[in-house]
Image (cartoon, rainbow, N blue to C red):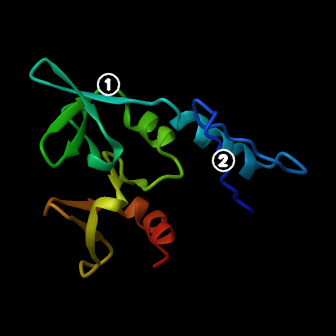
Amino acid sequence: MNVEIIIKSELKEPQVVIYTNEVTDEIQNIAHRISSFQNKVLTGTKNKKVFLIKNEDIYCFYSENQKIYAKTDKDNLEVKLRLYEIEKIYEGTSFIRISKSCIVNIDKVKSLDISYAGTIEIIFKNGYKEFVSRRFISKIKKYLGI
C-alpha cells in the first residue's frame, strides 16, 4: 500500500482520498477508521463538571460499579460510552481490549510482566497496573508481536 501526503494551503480541512482497483475489507476498514475518528471529542464527567479528554492523555478505559471511566494522569473521568462502543471507535489504534472490563492505551504502557504463569501484568508509565485476562492473552501477544 502506498501512502502519499500532499500539502495544499487552500484547503480548509484535511481531505482523504483512497485510490484502489477494488473495494476490499481492508479498504473498508481503513475508510471506517478514518471517518469514525473524524471530529470525535471525548468528554468525561467528575463532580458534575464536564472535561474534554485528549486520546494521548488516556491510560485506559475501565468499568466499575456499572459505569465506564477513562483513567488519565490527573483523574478518573466517567464517560457515557459502553466499553464495546469504545472498542469499536478505537479499533485499529493503540487502544486494545485486555479484559471484559478494561481497554488500555498501549502507548502509555511502560512494561509487561509475564512472569506469572499464564497471565500478563501491564505496568503503565504512571505505575498503575492491570492484568490481561486469559481470554485476551493471545490477542495482546499478537498485537505486540510476542
Question: Height in image: 61 above or below 45?
Answer: below
Q: Residue furthest right?
A: 21
Q: Nearer the viewer, residue 98 or 52?
A: 52
Q: Residue furthest top?
A: 48
Is residue 121 shown to the viewer in this render? no
Q: Nearer the viewer, residue 50 or 99?
A: 50
Determine which residue is flagged by label 2.
30
Label whose residue precedes the other's in the sequence (1 or 2): 2
Residue 108 image point, x, y percent: 28, 60
Q: How crowded is the residue under tag 1: few (<14 C-alpha within 10 Å), some, or many (20+)? A: some
Q: Is residue 130 left or right of residue 55?
A: left
Residue 43 image point, x, y percent: 30, 28
Marks 1/2: CA distance?
26 Å
Q: How crowded is the residue under tag 2: few (<14 C-alpha within 10 Å), some, or many (20+)? A: some
Determine which residue is flagged by label 1.
80
Q: Nearer the viewer, residue 94 or 1?
A: 1
Quarter holding residue 64: top left
Is residue 144 shown to the viewer in this render? yes
As helix, strand or loop, the secondary structure at mark 2 comes to: helix
Residue 77 image point, x, y percent: 19, 34
Question: Height in image: 128 above or below 86?
Answer: below
Identity of the residue drawn at 45% across and 30% down: 40
Q: Type of residue at label 1?
A: Lys
Q: Is residue 127 left or right of residue 79?
A: left
Identity of the residue drawn at 13% across and 63% down: 127
Quadrant of the rendering where the C terminus is positioned? bottom left
Identity of the residue drawn at 33% across and 53% down: 104
Quadrant of the rendering where the N terminus is positioned? bottom right
Q: Type of residue at label 2?
A: Ile
Q: Is residue 66 left or right of residue 38?
A: left
